[in-house]
Amino acid sequence: MAGSRRGLRVFIWVEDYYARDFILALLGRLNLTGPRPLVKSAKGRGDLINRLGRTALDVLVAWGYDKLIAVVDGHGDPEGTARACMRQVPGHLRSRVHLIVFTWSIEEWVCVGLCLPLAGQRPLDVLLKHERRRKGAWVRDRDVKRWLASYASRPNLAKLEQNALFKRFLTALEDCPQGARAS
């Protein structure tokens, strides 16, 4: 019975520091009940991919977490990125590792939530154009990355929940008692 056993613990591992803050802020908006998942940064896409197997062992075996959710940018090749990630994970842990791989980058969720059409463009470029229209030509792509956490308060969650990848993220969270969404 789910009520009689201890709650499952979730570890979310993201590609970089800015994505970590964005996910933390987004989790705050989702009305989660119970303890929040632990969110840590891999400090780079290469580190996340190359260290995923070791991190899965540490997090799931040594630290006693029940699930690891890895959030990684696909940079135009989400299938290849997913294959590279899962090759690193030991076979006996693969059922407990959930990958959220964006086609390009985590800015996809911001664009979807702000109803900004991607039209085959990179999400960072779309967001950069949007911010330049709002604030001026001085805005650079690194500014948009730096502001990522502040975007978590702006997207329309109802619109975002229609996104297939965001649905997968919510499902991965909802499989766990602390990720159950409040009604």
Image (spheres, rainbow, N blue to C red):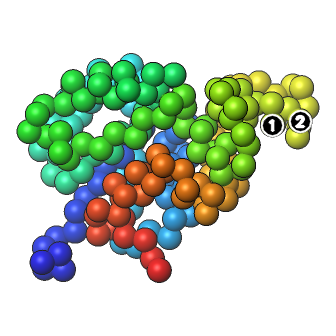
Q: 64 above or below 47?
A: below
Residue at the image point whose x is 54% and y is 28% from the top: 104
Q: 62 above or below 157?
A: above
Front residue of this view, candidates 153 and 91 = 91
Q: In the rendered structure, which amino acid carries the disc numbered 2?
A: Arg
Quadrant into which the N terminus falls? bottom left
In 3D space, how far apart are the residues under numbered discs 2 and 1 (Cα atoms)?
5 Å
The percent position of residue 141, horizontal first and vertical second, equals 71, 25
Determine which quarter of the picture holds residue 3: bottom left
Mark number, residue 133: 2
Determine which quarter of the picture holds residue 98: top left
Residue at the image point whose x is 8% and y is 39% from the top: 92
CB under 8 Å between discs 2 and 1: yes
Tell me the element at label 2. Answer: helix
Q: Taking 89 as reference, is 176 left or right? A: right
Does residue 141 appear anywhere in the picture? yes
Front residue of this view, candidates 79 and 66 = 79
Mark number, residue 169: none
The percent position of residue 174, horizontal first and vertical second, equals 35, 63
Q: How many marks?
A: 2
The percent position of residue 35, horizontal first and vertical second, equals 35, 66
- Residue under label 1, please give it: 130
Q: Taking 74 as reference, is 94 left or right? A: left
The outermost residue toward the left is 92
Front residue of this view, candidates 165 and 24 = 165
Q: In the rendered structure, which amino acid carries the disc numbered 1?
A: His
